[in-house]
Amino acid sequence: MNQSNEIPLNRIQSAIFGELKKNWGWLLAFGILSIVLGTIGLGMTFGLTLASVLVFGVLLVIGGVVQIFDAFKCKGWKSTLWHVLIALLYVGAGVMMVADPILASATLTLVLAAILLAVGVMRIFMSLQMRPVKGWGWLLAGGIITILLGGMIISGWPMSGLWVIGLFVAVELIVNGWTSVFVALAARIVAKEGQESAAARSATSGY
């Protein structure tokens, strides 16, 4: 009975991972590389912050220019003017970020801190509404931690603007890397189980 239940489970797992079972090594390598880059980034948050702001600014400029060209192809559209104005705002914001990435990083950090404070307050209200439900305390703790993080960023502003964005990018690289590693290893286990199951069926059919 257990053997008959094991085969459908393996098929479900195989369907989830698809071709990743054969190419899990590439995902594992990517995960390790992401972890290494994130760890290096933790030691150079200032440079990573400036690089992130510059890349974001360049992307805004490119996006704005493309949108302006697109606006000239939209003849007869009543919202063409708004389309162009939004594009100009994109270009203007991008140019400002490229011209003064330090000021831009400080501004973005302040906005990020305000968002964290708002998210923390909303999580606390959600937790209070969910008090009858088991585990509501974790949501409350998450809200408090988010508020503390936002408050810490604001208390250190504008100096925090020199490292916060880079820190967030570095941490995201590390988290993404470990996630990729775990997924790759899971795909490897499923592939190995599939091979063992196929070998067992082949051996059984041989008798």
Image: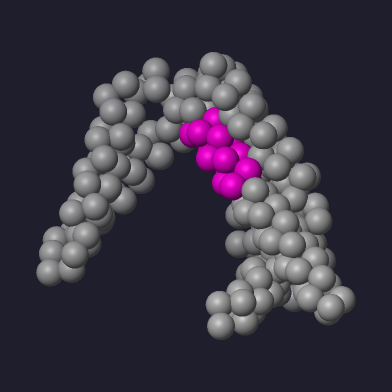
How is the structure coloured here?
A: one colour
Using residue 54 as the reference point, say whether residue 145 is left or right of it: left
Q: Quadrant of the N terminus?
A: bottom right
Question: 145 above or below 133?
Answer: above
Q: Is residue 22 magenta?
A: no
Q: Which x, y percent locates residue 21?
A: 75, 58
Q: What are the residue bounds of the magenta stretch?
A: 168-182
Question: In percent of the image, x 28 and y 28: which residue is there?
Answer: 152
Is-magenta flag for residue 181?
yes
Q: Nearer the viewer, residue 143 or 8?
A: 8
Q: Nearer the viewer, residue 120 or 9?
A: 9
Relative to 49, is 64 above or below?
A: below
- Residue 152: tell me if it is visible: yes
> Does residue 129 appear anywhere in the picture?
no
**Residue 154: x and y, percent?**
30, 29
Q: Residue at x 56, y 35 (%)?
A: 174
Which quadrant would residue 112 be assigned to in this image?
Answer: top left
Query: Closest to the observer: 33 or 23?
Result: 23
The count of marks equals 0
- The answer to which of 113 and 197 lies nearer the viewer is 197
In what quadrant of the picture does the C terminus appear?
bottom right
Q: Residue furthest front?
A: 207
| Principal secondary structure, stretch drawn in magenta | helix
- Residue at image point 56% right, 77% down: 2
Q: Residue 143: give x, y in percent of width and height.
A: 25, 48
Residue at the outermost right position: 206
**In this picture, residue 132 sits left or right of residue 54:** left
Give the quadrant of residue 149.
Answer: top left
* Residue 58 % position (x, y): 70, 36
